[in-house]
Amino acid sequence: MKIGFIGVGNMAQAMIKGLVKADQIATTDILVHGAHPANYEAFAAEQHITPVADNIAVVAQADIVFLAVKPYIVPLILEETGAAFKEKQPLMVSMAAGLSLAKLSQQVDADNLPILRIMPNVNVANRAGITAVVGNAQVSADQLKSVKDVLSQIGGVVEIGEKDFTTFSALAGSSPAFVYLFIDSMARAGVKHGLTKKAATEIAAQAVLGSAQNVLLSDDSPWDLIDKVSSPGGTTVAGLLAMEEAGLMSAVVKGIDATIEKDLESQK
C-alpha cells in the first residue's frame, strides 16, 4: 500500500516522522509533493521517502491520498487533481479544518468518491497523538480500516461525528499548548521553591506523562484517580482546594469554550 501527501507542512511532517519511526510502511511507499521543491525534496531526502513531481502523480500512484494543505488551497488542488481522483479512485483523506465531507465532494465533483476527514494533533510526530476520523457513505469498511491502521501507528484514533470536529480541535488540537502552559506553571512553582528550571520542567512533564497514561490504562475516572492520590487532611487535598479556589477548572473550561468559539467564527 502506498500513501501520498499533497502538502508537506508542519502537520504532514509530524505524521510522516511518526510513520517513519513506526517502521510499518516502507519509506519508499510514502510519496510527497509540495509547493516548494527545495523544502519537500529536502524533507524527503531526510526521511528517506519518495518525492514526486506533481500533485497528479501523487493521486495516480497512491492508494490513500492525504490532503495536507490549508483550507483555502484545497479548491485549487482539487481543480488540478479532480480528473485523476475520478480515474484512479484512491481514498481521499482531508486534513483541512472546516471543510465538510459534502463540500469536499462538491469541490472534486465526484459523488462516488470515498472521502475521509481527519484531524490529527501534533503529538503524532512522537507516535503519541490522537486523530479524529469521519467518512462519507462511499468509504467502505475495508478502506476505513486501512486508514485507521495507518493512523494507529502514530497514536490513538477516534471515530466521531462531523459536527464534533470543532470540539475535538479544542480538546486535542489546541490542548497541547494548554498542557505545556500547565507544565511550565508547575515548573515555575518548583523554581520558586529552589529547583532549577530544567529539573522542575522534567519533573512536571514526567508527572503529566505518567498521570495521562494512568487515565488511559485505568477503568477509573480522573476524579476517582484524584481520590486515590488524596489522603484525608493531606497535602494533595490542600493543593487541590487552593487550585479550585483560584478557579482552575472554570479557567480550563473557559479556555476550551474560547477555542471552540474562535474555530466556529473562522468557518463562517
Image (cartoon, rainbow, N blue to C red):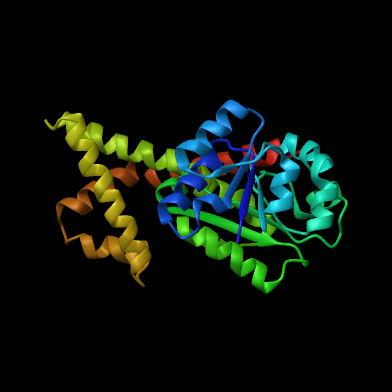
The residue nearer to you, when weighing 10 against 47, is 47
Q: Is residue 230 above or below residue 169?
A: below
Q: Quadrant of the N terminus?
A: bottom right
The residue nearer to you, when weighing 94 against 27, is 27
Quarter where residue 193 is shown: top left
Question: Left or right: 259 with respect to 139?
Answer: left
Q: Is residue 66 visible?
A: yes
- Residue sitting at the far left: 194
Q: Is residue 90 above or below residue 266?
A: below
Q: Is residue 247 visible?
A: no
Quarter where residue 234 is shown: bottom left
Q: Residue placed at 20% from the left, 43% from the top?
A: 203
Q: Residue placed at 61% from the left, 42% from the top?
A: 32
The image shows residue 36 at horizontal and vertical percentages of 63, 27
The image shows residue 70 at horizontal and vertical percentages of 67, 36
- Number of marks: 0
Q: Quadrant of the C terminus?
A: top right
Q: Residue placed at 77% from the left, 67% from the top?
A: 137
Q: Residue placed at 66% from the left, 61% from the top?
A: 134
The image shows residue 220 at horizontal and vertical percentages of 34, 70
The residue nearer to you, when weighing 6 against 94, is 6
The image shows residue 240 at horizontal and vertical percentages of 27, 50
Question: Left or right: 138 with respect to 214?
Answer: right
